[in-house]
Structures are given as structure tokens and as C-alpha cells.
Image: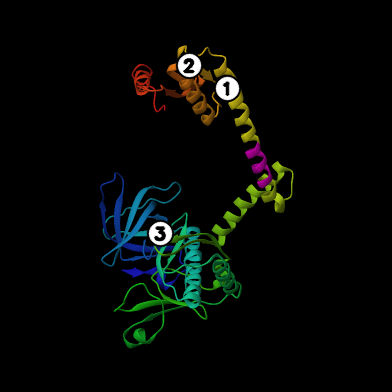
Amino acid sequence: MRKLFYENINITDFTATVLSCEPVEKKNLYRVLLNATAFFPEEGGQSADRGVLAGREVLDVQIREGYIHHYLGEPVAGAMLQEITEGAVVMGCIDWEHRFSNMQQHSGEHLFSGTVHAKYGYDNVGFHLSDSEVTMDFSGVIPPEGLKEIEDVVNRAIFLNIPSEIVFLEGEEAQRAEYRSKLTLTEAVRVVRFPGYDACACCAPHVARTGEIGCLKVVGAINYKGGTRVSMLCGRRAMELFRHDRDILVMTANYLTTNTDEVYESVNRLKAENTELKAKLKQAGLELMRRKVDAIPEGAGNAVLFESADADQAVIREAVNVLMEKMGGFCAVFAGNDTEGYRFIIGKKGGDARLASNILRERFGARGGG
């Protein structure tokens, strides 16, 4: 099977001969083998290409024992539907926007991982590239200032628009060459090089020049299995995230009637004010609840109070404790209303309040309680 994505990384349309086509378990899903394909399969931590084949949507592309299997779904509106019988010649079309986005992310990952390896000596022991996230797992801890420095180095390499080099090495040449690899490779090795920054064994499509990556932005980092898991985005994905976050920042600044560079201070001030108001409200609620409890005649036995839905849980608990000391019977506070339901705490000094809770569950379907 010819892998056309190795012959021409920019290919979008191609024709090929069907070697086999068979239905799979899911309804209206077919598995197709071709004598040549431009669809890159899910491999090396990267999601598969998308597109159209024989007028049908390509839902997945997997490689099994050296053969690339195309999984086809429903016909695509506006596409020319073709027979996919053995020997038929069919047309395929790659979703270039999706392919190019994957190329940007993967090439950016190589630059980032190569720079980490050069600076810290850490290996990239895990890589995941899906349509929603890009993560890299490194074998050591990278401090926050180190991540910023590496991000700067990678973006400098992107701005220099360095050409990539892709070579196939085998035999002694492969043994002598220096390149990163997660596996011990004994056959011909495909090495992707970004001169001065990285050389890595890789099966995936990559950009022709680093400038095509656009930019790289680290969007998260966590400690993971004794090392660091880094999340990053490149190119259009990074721009979409920046636009999304910028829109939120501007809307927040407008809501607070302040400048974007003063949003953090404004939010912190509001948080402090809110904490202070909550404390005052809680204290007022305790005072009000004490007055209600004091108004109940002592030793009256069972006692129940009903409060509004926004009553503080700590205030309710305190009221039940005071009632138990004063009344001697079952004491409860319910907070809520008949439409949305109630939260409740029930207690009985020297007794078992679960008896009352069980009755509420049996008769009214109550849950929880205390």
C-alpha cells in the first residue's frame, strides 16, 4: 500500500483502487482497503485524518499489520457517491484544515520536546494529540519559569521559519545518527529534523517550515507520575483559545467597569467584600434564629422551625443544637419551600433522630438529612 502522505504532504485529492470492502458491526459502516491512500491513520499519539472517500464520510483510519483501514459512514451531501466494490477506482479527499492543524500541533510538540531534552535531559514519555487537546508527558519536573523559557525558545524557532528535514535511515547510518525515540528501532527509521532544535523518529506528517506552526502557547502543566504533563496549543487552535479568553476578559472588565489590566485586582476586591458580607449575613442569621428559638416555650417537647431556602446550613445546625438542649424532644429545622423541596436537620438529645428521618423517607421520599 502506497502512503501518499509521505510522497506529498500537501496532497488533498487522490484516486485509488479498492482492494476490499466489508461491513462491520455498526450499521452502514464499511471497512475499506485501498492500494494507495493519502489518509494518515491514528498513529504515534495523533488522531487520524478526516475527509471523504467514495462520497462517504471517513469516520476513522486505523493501521493494522501494515495495512491502513478506512472506516466509512454515511454519504456526504453534495459529494459524488461511488461504488466501493473490489477493483473499483474511487476518489478520496482529505480534510486539509484538520490535517494542517494536526501538523501544526505535532511539529510544535517536536520543537518543545527537543528543547526540553536539550535543557533538562528529560524524555517525552507520552504524547496525545486529539481534536481538542495536546499533551506531552516528560520524565522530570519542569518549573514554571522553565516552561516560559522553553515556550520563548520554541516561538523564536517558529519565527525563524526553519525548514524541516525528513529522512529515512537504516543500517549503520541509523545506528550512528542522533535522534530522540521512545522505542528501540531495528528497521528503517523515519526521522523528522528541525536543524538546531530537534531530531526525532516519527511517522506523522509535519510542516515544511517552522513558520507554518504559527505560534505555540503552553496552556497548562501538572505534576504527573513523577514528571510533568504539559498541555499546549499551536497555530489556529492557539489563536482560537486566545480569542476566547480575551473575549471573556473584556466582558468581565466591562461588567466591572474597569480596564482589562485591573480585572484581577477588582475581582479580588469583590471576593473580599463578598466574604465579609457572608460573615455578617451569617451572624445576622444566627441572631435571628436565636430569637426564634428563645420565643419557643422551654420543655415543650418536639419542635420544628421552617426557614427560607437560602438559610445558611451552619445556622440551621446551630439552631437544632440549641433546640435539643432546650426542648427535650425531636427538634428539626427545614429550609426551602413546597415547590422546590426542603433541606433539613433533625436531632434528639439522648435519642435516635434516625427514627424521624426514616419516617420522612418512607412517607415523602426524603433523601439525606442529618
What is the CA distance from the residue labelled 2 to the residue labelled 1?
A: 14 Å
Residue at the image point whose x is 74% and y is 50% from the top? 259
Circle 1 sits on which residue? 290
Check disc 1 and report its element: helix, strand or loop: helix
**Residue 345 placement, left or right of 296:** left
Where disc 2 sits, the SS reads strand
- The answer for how far apart the CA atoms under marks 1 and 3 are is 63 Å
Q: Residues within 10 Å of mark 1 (few under 14, many from 20)?
A: some
Whole-percent x, y for residue 189 in the image: 35, 78
Q: Which residues are magenta?
A: 268-276
Q: Earlier in the sequence, mark 2 or mark 1?
A: 1
Q: Is residue 291 above or below residue 257?
A: above
Instruction: Return the x and y of residue 151 as percentages of the image width and height.
Output: 56, 68
Main structural element of the magenta stretch: helix, strand or loop?
helix
Question: Horizontal and vertical percent for residue 203?
Answer: 38, 70
State yes or no: discs 3 and 2 in contact (Cβ < 8 Å). no
**Circle nearer the N terminus (3, 2):** 3
Say which amino acid is labelled 1.
Answer: Arg
Q: Is residue 329 above or below residue 27?
A: above
